[in-house]
Image (tube, grey):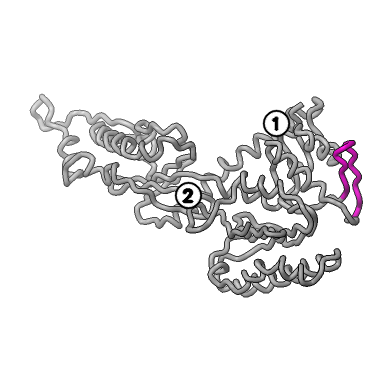
């Protein structure tokens, strides 16, 4: 099975790196299985450097395979698809933060990853998937509604790209929504206060709505935003992605009154979005939504602390590996870089740890991640090792 995949959702001939794909990789067994990770550059001028480093990693993989007993013709056949990438200039022109390559007999997958992986190769009887798991966040989708009195744009984003959606069913501006050409003249007409009954030319009081906005102006904006909400409802009807608003301060709370989308988040992008490109909106949305995306990690970390001492947590990697193989690990925290070598016998649950890699050893941290993933658990990886290794058990 051969494929080149990327976290860029919707790109032509590309598949999304998601939990299902990672699980499929985790299920693979058979020697030799080669995993290659490489941090890469998004800037095209840095491509030659990435190519050289990838070529060196392939050479290291070749040397390790031969040292492990593979014959040179078999190694050449195994690595041929990866070496062909060196000649594919179009592939290297569209890199992200990293590259992950998985090679086995009749298997070749190359992923562009949004999370920067450690540079390494691994040859064993399974793929090394732990550094890949941080990239699963790249499948987190979100929506941005960039709205002003003059323009309405709805955009769909992932960690790696942003694209505009067709919102032709929604009004394109406040003027269109209210069906007149000169909004300012209408606001002035309706907010001009008549002379008071005293006949002395004094003005009556002007009552204001939200944030000091004249009532009629707020009512018009509310009508406009309700029309927008109705116009985009078909597009977002079955969505669960978070929606973030982009607009000037005084418009945002008024739109919230009109909104019917249940996944509108509290985070906002403040400022006039009319002249911002999708790329600029994308960068700002990622910054604003980072706390939202990290919430599951933070919640699970808090849960780990909360239930510590209650017999359902462990920081012992051997115990975690055994529990993961039995499907008891609900949440796992593990480093995405540091390897812990050893062996595991599932028939008796015996785990043996070694200071350095011995023949036949597995990366126990990766094994724990694989088993947790295969049994439907959640795996959090972090280079900071904030709580690694640690696990919350189901029972």
Is residue 383 at least partly visible in the picture?
Answer: no
> Within the image, what quadrant is residue 203 found in?
top left
The image shows a total of numbered marks equal to 2
Q: Image check: 63 left or right of 81?
A: right
Quadrant for the N terminus, please: bottom right
Q: Residue at x 86, y 65 (%)?
A: 69
Please, what is the dominant secondary structure of the magenta stretch? strand
Is residue 350 rendered magenta in the image? yes
How dense is the environment of label 2, judged by Cα within 10 Å: few (below 14), some, or many (20 and up)? many
Is residue 34 rendered magenta in the image? no
Distance (Cα) linking label 2 and label 1: 30 Å
Is residue 248 at least partly visible in the picture?
Answer: yes
**Which residue is at the front of the view, 201 or 357?**
357
Residue 369 position within the rendered picture, expressed as x and y whole percent measured from the top left = 74, 44
Q: Image check: 26 left or right of 279?
A: right
Kind of element beneath mark 1:
helix
Kind of element beneath mark 2:
strand
Residue at image mark 2:
157
Name the residue at the left extreme. 199
Reply above or below: 147 against 226.
Answer: below
Residue 106 position within the rendered picture, expressed as x and y whole percent measured from the top left = 68, 59
Reply above or below: 196 against 33.
Answer: above
Q: Residue at x 19, y 35 (%)?
A: 191
Reply above or below: 51 against 167.
Answer: below
Q: Residue at x 27, y 43 (%)?
A: 171
Residue numbers of the magenta segment: 342-356
Instruction: Name which of mark 2 and mark 1 comes first in the sequence.
Output: 2
Residue at image mark 1:
303
Residue 296 position within the rendered picture, expressed as x and y whole percent measured from the top left = 62, 37
The mark lying in front, picked from 2 and 1, is 2
């Amino acid at each position: 099975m051969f494929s080149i995949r990327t976290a860029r959702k919707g790109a032509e001939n590309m598949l999304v790196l998601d939990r299902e794909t990672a699980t499929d990789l985790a299920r693979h067994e058979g020697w030799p299985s080669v995993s290659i990770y490489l941090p890469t550059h998004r800037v095209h001028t840095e491509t030659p450097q990435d190519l050289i480093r990838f070529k060196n990693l392939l050479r290291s993989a070749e040397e390790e395979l031969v040292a492990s007993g593979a014959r040179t013709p078999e190694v050449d056949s195994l690595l041929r698809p990866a070496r062909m990438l060196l000649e594919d200039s179009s592939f290297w022109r569209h890199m992200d933060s990293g590259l992950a390559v998985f090679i086995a007999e009749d298997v070749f997958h190359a992923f562009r990853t949004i999370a920067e992986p450690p540079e390494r190769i691994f040859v064993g009887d399974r793929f090394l998937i732990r550094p890949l798991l941080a990239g699963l966040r790249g499948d987190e989708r979100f929506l941005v509604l960039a709205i002003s009195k003059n323009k309405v744009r709805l955009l769909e984003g992932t960690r790696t790209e942003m694209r505009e959606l067709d919102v032709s069913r929604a009004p394109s501006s406040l003027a269109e929504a209210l069906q007149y050409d000169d909004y300012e003249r209408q606001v002035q007409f309706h907010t001009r206060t008549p002379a008071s009954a005293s006949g002395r030319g004094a003005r009556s009081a002007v009552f204001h709505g939200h944030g000091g906005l004249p009532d009629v102006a707020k009512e018009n904006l509310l009508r406009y935003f309700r029309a927008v909400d109705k116009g985009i409802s078909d597009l977002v009807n079955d969505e669960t992605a978070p929606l973030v608003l982009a607009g000037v301060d005084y418009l945002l709370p008024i739109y919230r009154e009109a909104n019917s989308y249940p996944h509108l988040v509290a985070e906002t992008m403040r400022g006039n979005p009319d002249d911002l490109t999708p790329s600029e909106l994308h960068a700002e949305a990622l910054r604003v939504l980072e706390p939202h995306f990290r919430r599951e990690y933070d919640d699970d970390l808090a849960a780990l602390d909360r239930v510590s001492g209650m017999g359902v947590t462990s920081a012992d990697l051997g115990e975690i590996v055994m529990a993961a193989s039995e499907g008891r690990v609900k949440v796992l925290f593990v480093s995405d870089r540091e390897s812990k070598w050893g062996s595991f016998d599932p028939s008796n649950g015996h785990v043996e740890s070694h200071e350095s890699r011995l023949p036949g050893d597995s990366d126990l941290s990766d094994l724990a991640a694989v088993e947790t993933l295969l049994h439907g658990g959640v795996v959090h990886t972090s280079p900071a090792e904030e709580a690694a290794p640690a696990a919350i058990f189901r029972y």
